[in-house]
Structures are given as structure tokens and as C-alpha cells.
Image (spheres, coloured by chain):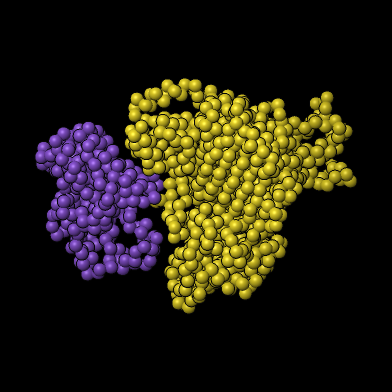
């Protein structure tokens, strides 16, 4: 056994299972007597439901039951709850319209579930679903974000009287306006953050399994946080006490945020399983995923920076319109507010910031957190704006960033938008990234590309994000209806092997390895003797799951605390066995030693004594070596860094190729460098997807045009360059590991680096800004217009 | 998919008779287009007539002609030493269709019978002036393609093989849809002793078409520069979220030039 502790790039324990096709995903699970559910979904964006005729469908072969919203209402099933309440500028709470599990009275987006058919086979359920006759009265709809607040816009929720969910702000507008009044430059930018479809590889699935003898419910589901689902669904929707409801999230094939939320189908199969007294399985097909998984991003913003003559940022003023979709998804209201506006200081000393955000309803799929969640929107806005400032003032874009960085000796640093950064060194990540990308040699590469007829550009983004989510009291004061601590149970078995029960959940991140490495490091147990268990409310204590790059920073810290308890108890047992004072016992490398002697006991000696307590201080301590710790973080963590992209554009087609991508990130303590590199690469791939390829496009009639893989451009291997990934880490100062988190940095830092490179490549064409994605036809049109203009001049 | 009966006839005559006798029966070649259509419940055939038992696979090269059996897969054509030697552009085209799995199942006959306006093969068939042989007759490429998803095939008519005259030079260049990877514009150029033929797929609302302007220019001078002044009208081009009609019209010129450079 080589070194397997913190810092070792050990191979992922879970990969043998995944790569050999032996993963156990929700759809792989089949319960005895299982039935199949198929949703009949709305094919129109906005319509009144005059009637639902299920007579013919009910008689179709194999059909066991058909349920509609009215059936659920009869059982007093609640609507899907929202987990975060935002308050308006005037202090009143946000609009929180009902979100029925199955549509009642109206449908509000294409994909809104109207009825469920439960049958012996999926084929039969699908056949019968087509036989349901729904009498719709079509109503006008809105699919674009700005249209939601236009005068006379059709209303998504009539009772609200408008489409505004909330009108929120942060900062002191008067102070910011004053900063603008005296500024040498005011630089303004209008921009759109494009709407994305998460598209995890594994579609969502759920199995409801009601035990007719015990009255217990089990839900198997594709979730990033099974305890949260148990709480939301049990307490607010189905009214099942938590002791009677088990939620299992087995292997999950990617989430990216889209599997955080409590979805209608989970409640439907759980409830229906008791109605039909048999297990009920539902598995989304890809088309359903497009029209029912929460989408991401979708902001329309205006940003203005007041800038001094020397380039110092004096004040930032932002107005954002954020699309919530047709209903509030679980954490949707938090994304364009506390996960967005609080990040608008970025890595800069901008002294005053004001941001107002109007969240609006539209007849589209609900929008919620997607990898980065609010922080990519803030970073894209800020880093594009900084490049525009450089362009407008003539100050070099790197120099402008350096000039405005928060200095490394200024931590802890209080921003004007609520956050207090604990650590960071932005000059260093910038310096290393410039060197790794050979920034200074770029003009020669541009000239060489030009000789081949290509337009080459280089772009930079110096960014910061807040993750390690989150201090419970802080988020509670901001409207969260949940705590965001994490829990770990460390079970040392009699013979010294260890099982970790964590409240976090791995859906591709490699926690079974990373978290096990913490045990190798702290307890000295070999990796092969450590297993990590997650994703089952019947096995693990109440934990909050995985999102917001929190698993290591928060979940790992809970493990450290639990292992501290193991060591403390072990020392007492060791002191008894070796007839020494507890104060004299030291623990290192899996061994308890009496200080200054050669007397020692291994962890296995101690665990065996703990479970076979023949010679044991039974009056002082309990048998067993099994400890649980809850950890509530003191602050967010603040990873950051510098991303540099180099692109070439083919002027004949407008197509962009990413030639080089350099990332130098500060993610705090790294446990497994290989896994961190993989996480950053994956995040950057998604960032390149957003910048160049992906767009959820609705037409004016409310249909999702990019509703399949034939039209939604997911990034593929040939769209990606070789990545040059490195870290330059400063430690998080407030958690025991020093870790900050790495899951989202790639998706947050990269889109503006790519777009700044694209715009740099087109600098001779009079381009100041381009909205994402920078597709071939979009850039071709810009090049055409630029050529026409140049010819005219 | 909806239920249907599955039939795998052993003779061409049986296959033709099933298809002629049932207007709702559908012939299945590789199924790389039709199986997704079935899975999405966009078609409800009474019967699927699997053509894989008719012995329609194989490649022969003789007398300046490459003949490819209708059920020959793209992978087979792409990897065929004979095709690579005779018409390398055709092997390259086949090797660029879909992905490895699609090329393992998809067939030339299936592609031509379907005549997807964004498919690759129709451009080669039209540019090379190939002959499509069916169980009833031989059809010249110029008569075969009749618009998107429309061909000269009649009820119960089954493609058995396609014969390609060997050109002096040829090349296929494809500008892919970034999502589906089908052709937004695909251009096959071929130079024969009698002149140049240029067929464009992916671009037009009328499906694959011969580009008269390009053919005239390239017949006079088969070089990339010769394409420079030739324009393409945007009027009849497709427009969608991935490419406007104007962009497609522009790309026809770019892609043709690149195809000629490659030939």
C-alpha cells in the first residue's frame, strides 16, 4: 500500500463498478410486483383544462389506475414546496403561487404533468396515456424573459396580478448613484446569460414502494439529497411521518444541480404505490428530461461600472431580470439573489455595489440551480464588464484586473454585498496562469494564425465563487427554509476496518474515494478497508446532500470531527489497556502510543477491545467505536482563480475552436489531485458548452425548439481542447481541512474567458460584446457586418 | 414504439409482395433513422419487413463502376479497400456518417430510400451520376431524388444496389450541425472527362440538388479559385435554429471550395 491519504492521486474506488457496467442506478432496481407509470404531459404552454376524459384509457390493456390532479386533491396532497423565501424591496414576501403535483385547472408549460397512467408494463402505460382525452382551451403564453414584464403580458398565475415573483435588491442605491456622479468613466453593458438544459447522463427515475404490511413507504430516486426529499415530500406534500418514509438515492449518473429538487414524479409514484398497493416505477425518457428537469441560468441584465481616471472601480450598479419558469422549483428564488448578487464584488475592491433583481414567471420549464448556480451569472457579467472597461478606457485588461484585486494581505475581506472572504491570493493565480498560458507569447501565435486565415483571440477571467454551502444561521436569515450543516458517522468495526456514513451524496464526484482518503489520513486505515455509504435515509443520519461544492468542505469537516471523537475515545481505551494516563496517549499512523515509551496498541487492538469489552473501563465509557458528528460551517468558502482561453475563429464559417485552455484555481486543501483535475475539466467542458454551444431556445408559441439531442448542442470531446489545469492554493481558514471545494469552479470561471477570447479574436471587427452561445452563424453575421462596415469606411 | 408484426422474408419477391399488399407495411434496412422514429411513436406501421435476409450486401468493382449492394453498411463501404482505391471520396463520405455504431448498422439503400435532406449519401449518388437499381428497374440519380424524403421509388419497390461511375477526382466536404452532426451543408464534387458535377445536401428545402453555377465554373476550371464568383440563392435554402437560409447559402460556396481543394 502506497500513500493513500490527503494529497494522493489514488484511483477511484467506485470506477470498477461504473466502468464495468455494474453500477446500481434507480432504473436498475426492480421491486416484486412492480408497475410502471407514464406521465401524460401538456403539449401546450398555457391552457385552461376544461376536462380530462380517462374512460377509454382506463379500459386499455394492462392499465391498473389513472390519476389526475383532482384525485390527488381528494387525498389532500399538498403542492410542491419551495425551500427558499425571498423578500421584496418593501419587505413583503415573494409571490409563491401553488405548484400542484399534477396540473389543476390549467397547464403552464410544455411538459407540465396532467395525469399519470399506471399499468403492468411501460408500453401499456404509454399506449393508455395517449388515449386520455384532455379538453384544453389554449391561452396566450410568454416564453421570453423580457416579455414577462411587458404591458399586457399574459399571466402565468392569474391570482398574482403580474408575472413578478419578487422585486429584490441589495446595497444602498443612493451611495452607488453618488459614486457614479463623480466618476471619470461610466461603462455600461447589456447582456444575457443563456438558458441551459442540464442533461445529466442518467435521466431522472423514481420508484415508490409501499409496504402493505407495515405501512412504510420507500422511494428510490435519482437525488442529490435524499433526506431533503424525505423532509419536503413527507412533511409538505404527502403528509407521511419521517419514521414511515425511507428515501434511497442509489448510484446517480450526474446531477449538476438538476437532481437537488423535489419533483412531481417522486410524489406521484410514492402516493400511487399506496393507492394501487404495488410498487410503481417511473423513468424519464430524454424528451421528458428536456421538458421536466429544472433548467439553468436565463438572466437578462444591465451592468454599469463607475471607474476612476486611473482605472479603479468606484461603484457597480446592476439590474437583472431572472426567469423562474412557470413554477418555483425548490431552491429557485435563491439563485438570482443570494447565490448571484452577493458575488458581484468578485475578486475586486469595488467599494459600493447595488443590484436589483426582478424574478419573473414565464410559460417555461422551472429554472433552478445548475452547476455554479448564480455564480456563473455573476462571473460572466463581471468579467465581461471588466473587459469592456479595458476596451473603453484603453487600460490593459490584465493591468486593470491587477489594479483592482483585493490584495492578499487584506483577508478577511468584507465585501459591500454581505460576504466576508477568508483567504485568497489573486495576484498569484493570475501570475501563474499568465505564465502557464504563455500570455506574453500570444501575439506571435495570433500572427501565425492570421497567416493561415484564422482569427485568433485570447481571453482571461479572474473570478471568485462562494461555496462550501453553508452556515445555517446565515442562510436562514436570508430566507432558506433548511439548515445546511452536514453529518458524518464513522463506524470503526471490531477488526479495525471502517465504514463512513455521510450525509453528502456522490453522483459522479468520486466521494467513495475522496472521503475514504480522509480516513486513511486521519486514522491510518488502508483505503481498501474503508467504505463510504451515502444516499439512504435508513442508513445515514439526517444529512443535507451534495451541491454548492460542499461535500468535502462541509461533509469532510463533519468526518474530521467524528474521527476526532473516535481518537479521543480510543485514547481512553488505550490508556486503560496500557495502564497509562490518557494525557500520555498519542495517536498517529493507526497506532496509540504511550508517549516516551515503546508501548503501543493499534487501532484494531482498540476497536476489538471496544466491541469485546472484557478488559475495559466500562464504568467510564460505553462499548463500541462508532461516532457521529454534525458540522455547521462558520462561513462560506471562497475558491477562485484565473482561467485563460485561446480560440481560433474561421472567418468563412464563424466557427470557433478552443485551442488552449489554462486554469489555475485556488480550491484550498486538495485531497485527491487527480479527482480535482477531473472535476475542473468537467466544469470547464460545461463552461465551453455554455459559451459556444448550448441554448435552450423557446419559440414564440412556447415550444422548446432545442428539445432533443438533435437540436441541443451538448459539448463533445471534439469541441474541447486539452486542458492545462493547475492549482495554487491558499487554505480555507475556518474549516478543519482547509478545503474550499472544486466542483463548480470550472463552470463558473470559464464562460467569460472563452467569450473574452472570442471578442478579442474579433477586435478588428468593432465588436464590444457577444451574448452566449457564440455559434458559427452568429459570429459569421458579425464578421460579415464588420467586413461590410470596413469596406464602407 | 407501437406494436407491429415483424417479417424477415428470404426473397426479394416475398419482400416486394408483402410491401405491395399492405400500404402500412414498412421496409427496414439498417433502421438508423426509422427505429428512432418508431421509438418516438412518430410512425405506426402494421408490419416491419426486415430486408437483411435478401442477400443485398456486397461491393464489386468492375469496368470503371463501383456497385454497392443496398444493404451494405456505411462501415463496410468506409473500410472497403476496393472503394478506397476506386472512389476514395465515397469511402470517406461513408466513414463520416453518424458514429461507429450507426455506421455498423446503417445502409446505403436505407439512406437513399429515406432521402433525408441532411443525409450524406444522396450528394454522392447525384454528383457521381450513379444508377439506382431496384427490384423493378434502374433509375438514374438525376431522376431519383424528388425533394425532401421523396424519391422515384414506387409502392413495393426495393433498392437492390447502387452503381457509381468512377470519376477522375472527387471529394465530399461536410459542414456539420453542431448538435445532430448531420450535414447543414454537404457538398460532393466530382470531375469526369465530360465535366464537373456538384451535388449539395443539407442546404435546400428541395433536398439534395445539383449546383448548376458551380458545375459550370468547375467544368471550365476544376480548382478552388473557380468557385469564388459563384453565388447561391438563399431563397430556397432551409433555415432553422442552427443556420439561417443566408448562412446556408454562404456555406455552399465555402464548402464547395473546400471540397474541390480536397479532391
> Residue B52 appears at what percent x and percent y?
26, 56
> Residue A11 appears at what percent x and percent y?
56, 36
* Residue A722 visible in the current orientation: no
Looking at the picture, does residue B187 appear above or below residue A407? below
Chain with purple colouring? B
Looking at the picture, does residue A274 appear above or below residue A499? below
Q: Please indicate whether residue A194 sits to the left or right of residue A220 in the image.
A: left
**Tag count in the figure?**
0
Quadrant including the C terminus of chain A: top left
Task: Give the image quarter of residue B114.
Answer: bottom left
* Residue A105 visible in the current orientation: yes
Residue at 41 percent of width and 30 percent of height: A764
Chain with yellow colouring? A
Q: Nearer the viewer, residue B151 or A700?
A: A700
Residue at 34 percent of width and 48 percent of height: B244
Task: Give the image quarter of residue A409.
Answer: top right
Quadrant including the N terminus of chain A: top right
Q: Please indicate whether residue A500 sits to the left or right of residue A725 in the image.
A: right
> Residue A395 appears at what percent x and percent y?
54, 26
Q: Please indicate whether residue A214 sits to the left or right of residue A687 in the image.
A: right
Q: Which of A781 and A297 is in front in this view?
A: A781
> Residue A222 appears at what percent x and percent y?
57, 54
Amino acid at each position: 500500500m502506497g500513500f493513500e491519504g490527503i494529497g494522493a492521486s489514488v484511483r477511484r474506488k467506485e470506477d470498477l463498478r461504473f466502468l464495468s457496467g455494474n453500477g446500481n442506478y434507480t432504473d436498475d432496481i426492480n421491486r416484486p410486483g412492480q408497475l410502471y407509470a407514464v406521465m401524460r404531459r401538456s403539449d401546450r404552454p398555457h391552457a385552461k383544462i376544461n376536462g380530462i376524459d380517462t374512460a377509454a384509457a382506463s379500459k386499455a390493456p394492462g392499465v391498473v389506475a389513472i390519476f389526475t390532479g383532482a384525485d390527488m386533491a381528494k387525498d389532500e396532497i399538498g403542492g410542491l414546496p419551495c425551500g427558499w423565501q425571498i423578500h421584496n424591496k418593501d419587505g413583503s414576501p415573494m409571490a409563491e403561487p401553488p405548484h400542484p403535483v399534477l396540473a389543476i385547472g390549467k397547464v403552464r408549460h410544455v411538459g407540465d404533468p396532467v395525469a399519470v397512467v399506471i399499468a403492468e408494463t411501460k408500453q401499456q402505460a404509454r399506449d393508455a396515456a395517449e388515449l386520455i382525452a384532455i379538453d384544453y382551451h389554449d391561452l396566450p403564453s410568454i416564453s421570453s424573459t423580457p416579455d414577462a414584464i411587458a404591458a399586457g403580458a399574459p399571466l402565468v398565475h392569474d391570482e398574482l396580478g403580474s408575472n413578478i415573483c419578487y422585486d429584490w435588491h441589495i446595497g444602498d442605491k443612493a451611495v452607488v448613484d453618488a459614486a457614479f456622479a463623480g466618476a471619470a468613466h461610466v461603462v455600461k453593458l447589456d447582456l444575457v446569460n443563456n438558458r441551459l438544459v442540464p442533461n445529466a447522463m442518467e435521466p431522472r427515475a423514481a420508484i415508490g414502494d409501499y409496504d402493505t404490511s407495515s405501512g412504510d413507504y420507500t422511494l428510490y430516486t435519482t437525488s442529490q439529497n435524499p433526506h431533503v426529499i424525505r423532509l419536503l415530500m413527507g412533511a409538505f406534500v404527502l403528509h407521511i411521518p419521517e419514521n414511515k418514509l425511507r428515501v434511497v438515492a442509489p448510484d446517480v449518473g450526474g446531477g449538476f444541480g438538476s437532481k437537488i429538487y423535489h419533483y412531481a414524479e417522486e410524489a406521484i409514484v410514492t402516493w400511487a404505490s399506496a393507492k394501487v398497493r404495488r410498487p410503481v416505477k417511473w423513468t424519464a425518457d430524454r424528451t421528458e428530461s428536456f421538458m421536466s428537469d429544472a433548467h439553468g441560468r436565463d438572466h437578462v441584465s444591465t451592468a454599469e461600472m463607475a471607474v476612476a481616471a486611473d482605472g479603479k472601480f468606484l461603484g457597480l450598479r446592476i439590474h437583472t431580470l431572472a426567469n423562474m419558469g412557470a413554477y418555483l422549483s425548490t431552491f429557485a428564488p435563491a439563485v438570482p439573489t443570494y447565490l448571484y448578487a452577493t458575488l458581484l464584488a468578485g475578486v475586486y475592491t469595488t467599494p459600493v455595489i447595488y443590484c436589483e433583481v426582478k424574478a419573473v414567471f414565464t410559460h417555461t420549464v422551472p429554472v433552478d440551480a445548475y452547476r455554479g448556480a448564480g455564480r456563473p451569472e455573476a462571473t460572466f457579467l463581471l468579467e465581461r464588464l471588466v473587459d469592456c472597461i479595458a476596451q473603453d478606457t484603453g487600460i490593459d485588461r490584465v493591468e486593470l484586473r491587477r489594479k483592482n484585486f483585493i490584495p492578499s494581505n487584506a483577508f478577511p475581506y468584507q465585501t459591500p454585498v454581505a460576504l466576508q472572504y477568508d483567504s485568497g491570493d489573486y495576484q498569484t493565480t493570475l501570475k501563474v496562469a499568465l505564465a502557464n498560458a504563455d500570455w506574453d507569447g500570444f501575439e506571435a501565435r495570433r500572427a501565425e494564425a492570421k497567416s493561415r486565415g484564422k482569427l485568433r483571440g485570447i481571453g482571461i477571467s479572474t473570478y471568485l465563487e462562494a461555496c462550501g454551502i453553508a452556515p445555517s444561521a446565515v442562510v436562514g436569515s436570508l430566507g432558506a427554509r433548511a439548515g445546511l450543516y452536514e453529518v458524518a458517522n464513522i463506524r470503526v468495526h471490531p477488526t479495525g476496518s471502517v465504514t463512513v456514513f455521510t450525509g453528502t451524496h456522490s453522483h459522479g464526484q468520486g466521494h467513495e474515494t475522496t472521503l475514504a482518503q480522509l480516513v486513511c489520513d486521519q486514522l491510518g486505515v488502508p483505503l481498501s478497508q474503508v467504505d463510504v455509504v451515502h444516499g439512504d435515509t435508513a442508513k445515514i443520519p439526517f444529512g443535507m446532500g451534495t451541491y454548492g461544492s460542499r461535500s468535502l468542505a462541509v461533509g469532510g469537516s463533519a468526518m474530521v470531527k467524528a474521527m476526532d471523537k473516535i481518537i479521543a475515545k480510543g485514547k481512553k481505551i488505550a490508556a486503560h489497556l496500557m495502564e497509562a494516563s490518557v494525557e500520555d496517549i498519542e495517536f498517529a499512523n493507526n497506532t496509540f502510543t504511550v508517549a516516551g515509551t515503546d508501548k503501543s496498541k493499534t487501532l484494531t487492538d482498540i476497536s476489538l477491545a471496544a466491541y469485546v469489552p472484557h478488559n475495559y473501563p466500562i464504568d467510564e465509557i460505553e462499548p463500541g467505536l462508532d461516532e457521529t458528528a454534525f458540522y455547521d460551517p462558520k462561513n462560506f468558502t471562497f475558491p477562485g482563480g484565473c482561467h485563460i482561453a485561446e480560440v481560433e475563429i474561421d472567418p468563412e464559417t464563424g466557427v470557433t475552436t478552443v485551442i488552449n485552455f489554462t486554469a489555475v484555481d485556488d480550491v484550498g486543501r486538495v485531497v485527491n489531485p487527480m479527482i480535482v483535475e477531473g472535476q475542473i475539466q468537467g466544469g470547464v467542458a460545461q463552461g465551453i458548452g455554455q459559451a459556444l454551444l448550448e441554448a435552450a431556445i423557446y419559440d414564440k408559441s412556447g415550444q422548446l425548439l432545442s428539445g432533443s439531442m438533435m437540436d441541443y448542442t451538448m459539448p463533445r470531446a471534439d469541441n474541447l481542447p486539452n486542458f492545462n489545469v493547475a492549482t495554487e492554493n491558499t487554505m480555507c481558514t475556518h474549516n478543519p481541512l482547509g478545503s474550499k471545494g472544486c466542483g463548480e469552479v470550472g463552470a463558473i470561471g470559464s464562460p467569460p474567458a472563452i467569450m473574452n477570447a472570442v471578442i478579442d479574436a474579433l477586435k478588428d471587427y468593432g465588436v464590444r460584446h457577444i451574448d452566449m452561445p457564440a455559434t458559427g452563424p452568429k459570429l459569421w453575421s458579425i464578421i460579415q457586418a464588420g467586413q461590410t462596415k470596413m469596406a464602407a469606411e | 414504439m407501437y406494436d407491429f408484426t415483424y417479417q424477415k422474408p428470404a426473397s426479394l419477391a416475398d419482400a416486394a409482395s408483402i410491401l405491395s399488399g399492405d400500404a402500412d407495411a414498412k421496409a427496414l434496412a439498417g433502421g438508423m433513422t426509422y427505429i428512432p422514429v418508431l421509438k418516438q411513436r412518430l410512425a405506426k406501421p402494421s408490419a416491419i419487413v426486415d430486408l437483411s435476409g435478401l442477400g443485398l450486401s456486397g461491393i464489386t468493382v468492375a469496368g470503371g463502376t463501383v456497385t454497392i449492394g443496398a444493404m451494405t453498411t456505411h462501415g463496410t463501404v468506409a473500410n472497403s479497400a476496393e472503394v478506397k482505391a476506386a472512389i476514395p471520396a465515397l469511402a470517406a463520405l461513408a466513414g463520416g456518417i453518424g458514429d461507429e455504431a450507426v455506421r455498423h448498422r446503417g445502409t446505403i439503400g436505407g439512406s437513399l430510400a429515406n432521402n433525408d435532406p441532411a443525409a450524406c449519401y444522396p450528394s454522392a449518388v447525384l454528383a457521381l451520376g450513379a444508377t439506382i437499381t431496384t427490384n423493378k428497374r434502374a433509375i438514374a440519380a438525376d431522376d431519383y431524388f424528388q425533394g425532401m424524403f421523396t424519391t422515384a421509388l414506387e409502392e413495393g419497390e426495393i433498392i437492390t444496389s447502387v452503381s457509381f461511375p468512377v470519376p477522375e477526382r472527387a471529394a465530399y466536404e461536410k459542414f456539420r450541425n453542431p448538435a445532430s452532426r448531420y450535414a447543414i451543408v454537404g457538398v460532393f464534387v466530382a470531375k469526369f472527362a465530360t465535366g464537373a458535377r456538384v451535388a449539395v445536401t443539407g442546404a435546400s428545402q428541395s433536398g439534395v440538388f445539383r449546383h448548376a453555377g458551380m458545375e459550370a465554373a468547375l467544368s471550365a476550371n476544376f480548382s478552388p479559385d473557380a468557385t469564388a464568383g459563384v453565388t447561391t440563392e438563399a431563397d430556397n435554402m432551409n433555415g432553422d435554429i442552427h443556420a439561417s437560409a443566408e448562412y446556408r447559402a454562404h456555406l455552399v460556396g465555402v464548402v464547395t471550395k473546400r471540397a474541390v481543394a480536397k479532391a
